[in-house]
Image (cartoon, rainbow, N blue to C red):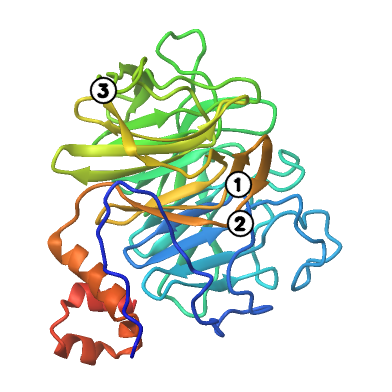
Amino acid sequence: MAKRRAIYAFRPFEVSDVDYRNTAINTSSIGSGRRYPKARSGHRIVCSDSSIYCFGGFNPNNSPARDGNNAGREDFFLFHELWKYDMIRKQWTLLLDANNDLPVELASNAMLLSGEMIMIFGGTGFPFGVTCSNRLHVCQTRRKPKALIEVEVEGDPPPPQYGQAIVVNDNFLYTIGGTNGFDYTLDVHRLHLPSRTWEFTYKCNQNIREDPSGRYRHELAYSDSKIYVIGGGTSDAVFILANIPVYDIQANKWEYLSTKPDPLANSPGIPTARKCHSCVQIRTDLGLEVIVAGGYDGVNYYNDIWKLNLSTMQWKKMDKSNLPYPLFFHDAAITSDGCMHIFGGIKYNNGTSVRTNKLFKMWTTIPRLSVIAWEALLHYIPSLPTRTKEELLEAGIPRQFVDRVHE
């Protein structure tokens, strides 16, 4: 008799391990045909509703014997790679490698997905801070063959840095903060995307009370005309999450907003100061919510997950949600349905730190019933992705899910 599959159970707010190692070998990978990314930190990921894209990263224990033409270079600790993870088939594909024209600044970049375009900005090579970038590269997710193209720009660009953070709002790409390895800023620059012209929008002045201190490895959230700076730090400091710097785009000024503690969590009911954490945002029935996971403060390492409602500025500790171990220098991305994925980073366990290539997922909210049904269908019929678009449509599967299979 055929082996019965385990009964599907939808488990919101629980962190689960995504087992991609037991899927069939994907022969479409380029280069050596490696099946999945090596352990790394300092990389960046973004995602659509069907795919995760992972760029760059660093591992000092990576073998010098690299694929392609990379052997013998001093930056072999860095990963000259762009990977794609197919959430439906649970397979990684190496899209670009060292044989392609990739920037050498491959750690602590800023990265986002705008529509079908991946945007990668800034970053550093190795040793960190020796080479930094203020260049913007883009990759069209649907274009074949894949290429990472540098955008030619005009105007007054930001200085070359790494550990900055970016958002896109109303035809502008905003970049805030970063470091060159010595100085830390929280200055605001923006690129007008239609004209590809940079302008220096706001220079922070430490003599102005509302102007926040410079930092790197912070994260950004945004709502309407406001950009929220979540955490971050310097080489010897981290910034608290009880008061959050907010940049008002329309007024072109900074302000601080006090956050409210979770009354059900242990005192102080607010996540501790941290950098090198991950942060995603999702719109729910309760408004726009920001999910912060992991990070460290230079001494302590965290595996906690918190949610901040931007309407009420109320923190909530997600008690059912914990990373399996303290994690930092990882990254996270979230689907439009609210499924967060966390990949890689440095895990701290039993007094030692080691890089990982684990992939975790967590439902941050309760999605539509059709989304849960689609997950159950993939669980019970794992061969579903092998069927043509026409066959899936004829079987009555809604087009939005068929499109995820045949992206």
Q: Quadrant of residue 289?
A: top left
Residue displayed at 78% across by 66% down:
70
Q: Position of residue 284 (x, y in %)?
A: 18, 44
For the residues bearing labels 2 and 3, Cβ distance under 8 angstroms: no
The residue that mark 2 highlights is 56
Q: Quadrant of residue 202?
A: top left
Residue displayed at 48% across by 55% down:
45
Q: Which is more N-terminal, label 2 or label 1?
A: 1
For the residues bearing labels 1 and 2, Cβ distance under 8 angstroms: yes
Query: Which label sits in the foreground, 2 or 3?
Result: 3
Quadrant the N terminus occupies: bottom left
The type of residue carrying mark 1 is Gly
- C-alpha separation, residue under disc 1 versus residue under disc 2: 8 Å
Tell me the number on the disc at residue 42: 1
Q: How packed is label 1: few (under 14 Cα within 10 Å), some, or many (20 or more)? A: many
- On screen, residue 363 versus residue 176, left or right, reads left
Residue displayed at 75% across by 73% down:
68
The residue that mark 3 highlights is 264
Q: Which is more N-terminal, label 3 or label 1?
A: 1
Mark 3: secondary structure: loop
154 relative to 5, above or below? above
- On screen, residue 254 versus residue 238, left or right, reads left
Quadrant the C terminus occupies: bottom left
- C-alpha separation, residue under disc 1 versus residue under disc 3: 33 Å
